[in-house]
Image: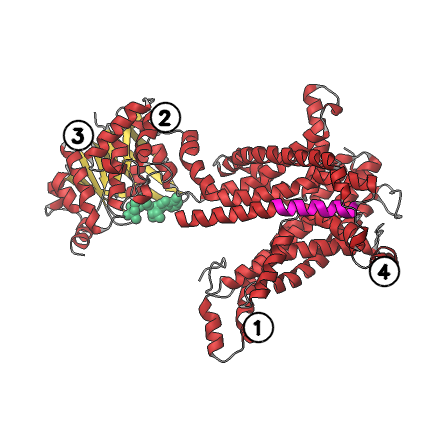
Amino acid sequence: MGGEFDWTVIWKYREALWDGMLTSLKLFAIALAGGIFFGTLLALARLSSWKALSLPAAGFVNLIRAIPFIMAIFWFYFLTPMIVSKFTGQQGEAVGPFTSAVVAFIMVESAYYSEIIRAGIQSIPRGQPAAAYALGMTYWQSMGHIVLPQAFRNMLPVMLTQAVILFQDTSLVYVVALKDFLGAASKAGQLTGRIVELYLFVAVVFFILCFAASWGVKRLQARLAVAR
Amino acid sequence: MDWKIFLEQAPSGGMTYLGWLWSGLFWTLAVSACAWVLAFTVGSVVGIARTTPLAWARALGTAYVELFRNIPLLVQMFLWYFVMPEVIPKAWGDWLKQDMPNLLTLPFAAQFSLWEFTAAVLCLGLYTASRVAEQVRSGIQSLPRGQVAAGLAMGLTLPQVYRHVTLPMAYRIVIPPMTSEFLTIFKNSSTALTIGVLELTAQSRQISEYTFKTFEAFTAATLIYIVITMTVILLMRTLERRVAVPGYIAQGGGH
Amino acid sequence: MAMIEIRNVSKWYGAFQVLKDCTSRVEKGEVVVVCGPSGSGKSTLIKTVNGLEPFQQGEIVVNGTSVGAAKTNLPKVRAQIGMVFQNFELFPHMSITDNLTLAQVKVLGRTREAAVEKGHKLLERVGLLNQKDKYPGQLSGGQQQRVAIARALSMDPIAMLFDEPTSALDPEMINEVLDVMVELAREGMTMMVVTHEMGFARKVAHRVVFMDHGQIVEDCTKDEFFGTPRSERAQAFLSKILHH
Ligand SMILES: Nc1ncnc2c1ncn2[C@@H]1O[C@H](COP(=O)(O)OP(=O)(O)OP(=O)(O)O)[C@@H](O)[C@H]1O
Ligand SMILES: [Mg+2]
């Protein structure tokens, strides 16, 4: 059936596809940075001996992890404009779909990253923060200079693997009709009827990117294992 | 907040909105269960293949895992549903799209056909199989190498060693992660809504669109997801205790 | 006024009482050795002194500051007291120099240059200046513990706490660490040392505290402790330690 394919459609829609890829990458980068930042705070909150902090954090993380990613996207897509307009008094439309998607992704990823980071922090022997405190460091100094740098180093392969998964998950914004890479291909497919070529192209691009990244992570992991 | 909304008659299916939710839950569980069986079967074959001494079997197994792991699930869903019927011989593709839906009418106010259901199960099952394969492989590889040697020394053939020594142990190690794979499928099954399968997430969105009671609709679905997740985790703990081999590594109970 | 004053301290882990009404003191310039069987609460006691372990009853006063009081600035108290741990606890992701300078810069607010100068002077003193750019993992246990002592000294502490500083070391490395500690004691550093090294105690200790089951069973001068009149429990402990 190969004769019926028309691969020129990909060239014809290269700009839209490229814009879509940029949207995907932007969402990925923001969600990654936000996820790690808030994930760290969530992990610290969960490890706190102060119940008023650890219980809500645990509740949030377990809640997010118990529901489908798409359900979480729907939730934040619904909540973000509502909450923003409540605080700013502006109309809900002031918050664009991209912002809502970003909020959803940061929330979900921070829950996933907090579990990784929590395990990383717990892998550091208790003597390390004790030594930092004994030198007169505060909680934040001990975390910032001693515990977290070591935890992140230990967790680097897992965090990068999760980043590859996150990059794949960005395609889920399709469900709120945001034009990411998959969304752009889908749109082009509707206009031309060439969904087969376009979806195959999307699959190949994702495969190449993710395969290369996973391979890089594996290499890094092997190097770290030797260094230790 | 208006929770009575769920008792109102829904515009289709001859049921209330609560009925829609149950229907969604039913299809979420149906898709998940079928996909899990598929994932377990295919994943076992692929995982075992990656541990055999046969180089070509290992290569095939590795290729499978890498292929399915590195393409987003949602894209895979579209490949099965939109692309696959177009790239197989035309008669087969047409059969999938036109005749398969008429084979039987799905129960429980499904509003979608057997073909959508099948595509969803294939996608979720074969995707998850790549994860299961990794669990099975690491389960087998975590066994002491001496076990296989001991089996072979007793005069068993390699398949016999797998059947009687390696696999029974490996599966005891693998069962806990296997049940958590069910939870993964259970959550991932919501991607099937993109090809029209009205599972739980889709139903809650549909209810929100019809009634504008978004908060209530999402809350109800979220609660159902949490209850099922907690139930599976409890079952998993019980099962883990059942299959633990006395005296064998970190199985909770200790020596 | 004593440098470290421990008054009627009790501590519980849930229902289990680790410290039972402990009272003792360390004068300025005094070396006190704490010993006792495993699990008797030695580590717990020494860690209450700089507030690493909270306690429920009693009072600990270090250089005039009550450690357990709610309004006490604990980091400030800790910055004045050096502590050396059984497992060294050097920061593995930092070079030896950075291990020595981090707290000087971040806690005491010294300039990086001043901190490096101070750190290197102390490294020289423990005989490890040539290791300054290495990482802790590249050093032997004895070397790591000497660096840890230098790190504690870099804060110009008014007293030093040691929690079994040699018990994680191979026998041939114990003396290189003890030598540093002996020198420190002879210079007049106030020291509280949990150790089973009775040779060290004989050489430099002024007093010996013996603990068992969370209680301070004996608190006496070195000569009294190693002389005849002492509790049965301490006798049993000593004979086990000396003849094993
Ligand atoms: N976090 C904790 N929770 C509960 N019990 C603890 C905890 N830390 C220590 N313990 C108990 O408190 C007692 C005293 O512990 P500690 O570490 O102070 O003993 P030690 O005298 O230093 O022993 P060792 O010579 O083995 O170092 C022990 O019985 C120990 O099991
Ligand atoms: Mg101890």
Whether the residue under disc 3 has CB within 8 Å of ligand 2 = no
Q: Is residue A187 visible?
A: yes
Tell me the CA gap for discs 1 and 2.
62 Å
Neighbor class of circle 3 (other Cα within 10 Å; few <14, some 14-19, many 20+) is some
Q: Which residue is mark 1?
A: B163
Mark 2, residue position: C106
Going by the numbered disc 4, the residue's amino acid type is Ala
Q: Are marks 4 and 1 on the same chain?
A: yes
The answer to the question of whether label 2 and label 4 lie on touching residues, with beta carbons closer than 8 A, is: no
Using the rendered view, name the quadrant where residue B43 is placed.
bottom right
Residue under label 3, please give it. C29
The tag on residue B91 is: 4
Q: Nearer the viewer, mark 4 or mark 1?
A: 4
Q: Nearer the viewer, mark 3 or mark 4?
A: 4
* C-alpha span from label 3 to label 1: 73 Å
Q: Secondary structure at mark 3?
A: loop
For the view shown, which residue lies furthest in the bottom direction? B155
